[in-house]
Image (cartoon, helix red, strand yellow):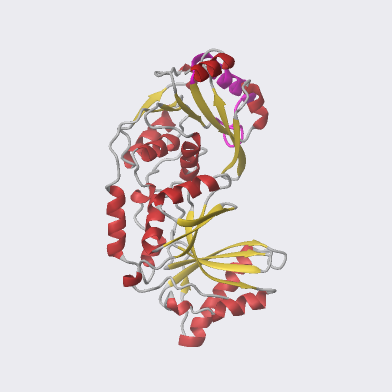
Amino acid sequence: MTQIDVNHDNEKENFDFEMKATTFHGLEDVLANELMKLGAREIVPFKRGVAFVGDKGFMYKANLCLRTALKVLVPIYSFTAKDEHVLYAKLKEFEWEEHISPNDTIAINSTVNSEIFDHSLYVSQKSKDAICDRFVDREGVRPNVDLDNPTLRIYIHIFKDQVNVSLDSSGDSLFKRGYRVDIDTAPMKEVLAAGMVLLSGWQPHLPLIDGMCGSGTLGIEAALYANNIPPGCFRKEFGFMKWRNYDAALWDKIYESSINRIKEDMPSIYSSDIESIPLEMAKRNAAVAKVDDMIQYQQISFFDTMPTKPHGTILLNPPYDERIKMEDTNAFYKQIGDKLKKDFGGWTCWLITSNMEAVKHIGLHPSKKITLFNAALECKLLKFEMYSGSKKASKQGNQEG
């Protein structure tokens, strides 16, 4: 049973500690690669997350720069608990006064996978009681709960009898970039959109078509990636900014360094939608993200879109017939396949959907399938490689080249 001190003095800012970045299922390797490029050490992917080691400055940088992370958690305490009484006692004995005062506020989020503890809300309530009772016993007053804007967010994860307690350095989930002022009927989370862009392997010197753009998240995330714009730069605050050891000067240094790495290239990103209302939403969101000059918007059906270059990447998030109903989903997906075969030889299309029955009507065999989740919907991200001429001739041409 150990406590990890993350409230070290500012002059010890190079003190390294373990962190865990959480993400959506299927994006673990993408997130691990992001962390490696940022400079994290001891990177270990796990289900829906990646563990790593870094210092306080790296924690700031991870929150600011990671595109596929939902939270950056700092583990502080772990123990085993056979019942609720042990859970309460262990949490009460932890030195919470090292992190907060009775005048501060807390919020507790719990995730449980245990036969002993079968209700996450009960675990959160019991944990809150333990923390508050410690302050009452010691000082006669207790911190209050603030679910929306607490001083300290505490995350408790229980697997069987193993309890892991972490501090949430992010605050609001990192998919809340801060640029999306308008959303359509079935919006895609920014983290998932960024994951699709990174999984696609799109290179910004090639064109990218977001052919059913909705409120524009895929195109915006592609633009942010293309010019190395940190996705957290639009947010006003992170959870760590309320911590006792928050170093404003260090944050300013990290922020300025990241902003100075922004490029000013003009990638060829085309976002289109057949409907005018979502397209206007997309334009407004892109303007807030300050990438509206990097994206060309057009009100047009994907089926009327034509390539301007011999090679490029298409990202499609078509209706699944779940939240957006369609008259004939199978015919719609067949039309997608026909369009790709007819006009996009030499291109690669990545399509995400939860409707695997409709996918059968595309008439193309995906070269890759990746399981992802769009909100609660289990989806497949499918890669379709369109060859110029026959597939055999294309392979022979590549070998001769």
Name the spot of residue 101 as percent of width and height, x first: 42, 78
Q: Is residue 293 above or below residue 261?
A: above
**Where is residue 122, by image quadrant?**
bottom right
Which range of residues does the magenta coloring cover?
A: 318-346
Asked if residue 396 shows in the view, the reply is yes
Q: Nearer the viewer, residue 399 or 370?
A: 399
Residue 387 falls left or right of residue 178:
right
Q: How many marks?
A: 0
**Where is residue 324, by image quadrant?**
top right
Name the spot of residue 87 as percent of width and height, x first: 63, 75
What residue is drawn where x is 53% and y is 14%?
Answer: 342
Name the spot of residue 319 as percent of width and height, x first: 56, 31
What residue is drawn where x is 63% and y is 20%?
Answer: 363
Asked if residue 175 shows in the view, the reply is no
- Please tell me whether residue 45 belongs to the stretch shown in magenta: no
Looking at this rendering, what residue extends furthest in the right direction?
115
What residue is drawn where x is 53% and y is 12%?
Answer: 389
Q: Is residue 367 above or below residue 190?
A: above
Q: Is residue 284 above or below residue 9?
A: above
Q: Nearer the viewer, residue 284 or 391?
A: 391
What residue is drawn where x is 32% and y is 32%?
Answer: 294
Name the spot of residue 296 as percent of width and height, x first: 35, 27
- Please tell me whether residue 319 belongs to the stretch shown in magenta: yes
**Where is residue 44, by image quadrant?**
bottom right
Q: Is residue 351 above or below residue 7?
A: above
Looking at this rendering, what residue extends furthest in the front direction?
400
Which quadrant: the N terminus? bottom right
